[in-house]
Image (tube, rainbow, N blue to C red):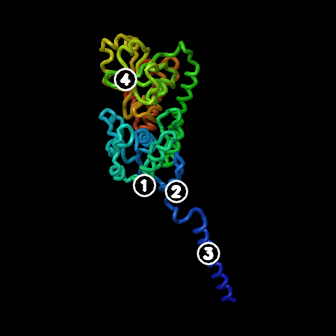
Amino acid sequence: MEKKVKVIILLLVVLVLAGLATHMFLTPSTVETVGSKNVTDMIGRNVEMPASVSNVVATSPPMTTVLYMIVPDKLKAVNFQWTDEEMEYVPSQYQNLPVVGGWYGTQDGSYEEFIASEPDVVIESIDEGGDGDASTVKERQEKFGTIPVIAVKDTTNVEKIGESITFMGEVVGAQDKAQQLNDFNKRYLDIVHDKSSKLSDSDKVKVYYAQGDDGLQTNPSHSTHGQLIDLVGGVNVADSAAQGNTTSGVQVSMEQVISWNPDKIITNDPEFYAKVYSDSNWGKIDAVKNHEVYLSPQSPFKWFDRPVGANMIIGVPWTAKVLYPDDYRDINMMDATKEFYSNFYHFDLSDDQAKDILLGSGLKEENL
């Protein structure tokens, strides 16, 4: 009898072990996939990547900016060096990240330096579809070898950026932070969409976007660089100079700007801003006469553009306050600035620091 019981127990053990073996080899969670997962990137490529990402780099500033906002401790390199002024609002642990260039306006990326930063994945920016994008991603993947390259849709349109932020959050394991950034963006987009839709043509202000240290380069409507003017309902005076060009800047003359006579001027160039009020030619323009010239805050990323990307999210309420301060009195720019810097630039501003940033941009204290 005892022998019979032992045989039965042995048979049961064999059956259990056989069941385990069958489970291991026939279910999707095989030993071969432990530590990795498959993702479909934003051009439809199936990419095998680590199940958990610890190190990440991106090939262009807009993507790097998003990564810095949602997962700074995993970002292992940047595309360009912060200036001393920009560094003022960068926490010390991120100030010495390697500069590896990238493939955007400068086309100065170094594959060797990217690889030396030991990324688990590389984020590659792509436009809205096209064979050129697919071929570029293929080339990147070949150059990066076994390091997975994840293609992410262009993040240069502040109204469409949410999908890419969400996807990047999923890739790097920062879903909650990505959602927080999207929620902040949606809050102010909703306000601006509502108010701008109610503007009559006679209420709209004429705006000139001055680029370069002489202020004579600009972008017309529907360009990525001037999109915040369009968004909040301003009239971009440079439309007549577009000549079908909405993607890159155009050169204009002083005479043209004087003839346009904008109500307000926005610039990203501190040199231009520093001298515009003392220049007799610019002094002929109403915006200058009325002290309505505004400098986009610069640090650690510019709020208006350059790069065009998630850094412009805080530029939405700022541009609204610049163009239509009376309509946006319900927006507290002090609170918005401190919230954005704390949550996404990982830097807690004092009241004085926030006020210095805003007053330094040309906003009047009563409009903060």
Please tell me which of labels 3 and 2 falls first in the chain: 3
Q: Secondary structure at mark 2?
A: strand
Q: Secondary structure at mark 3?
A: helix
- Local secondary structure at mark 1: loop
Residues marked 1 and 4 touching at CB (< 8 Å): no
**Residue 257 at x, y = what percent?**
39, 15
- For label 2, the residue is 37
> What label does residue 147 carry, if any?
1
Q: CA distance from mark 4 to mark 3?
A: 76 Å
Q: Nearer the viewer, residue 85 or 353?
A: 85
Q: Which mark is residue 251?
A: 4
Nearer the N terminus, badge 2 or badge 1? 2
Picture residue at 43% right of the left edge, 15% below the top: 262
Q: Earlier in the sequence, mark 4 or mark 3?
A: 3
Q: Secondary structure at mark 4?
A: strand
Give the mark nearest the N terminus, 2 or 4. 2
x, y percent for residue 208 = 42, 19
The kind of residue tagged 2 is: Lys
> Residue at the location (55% across, 15% down)?
201
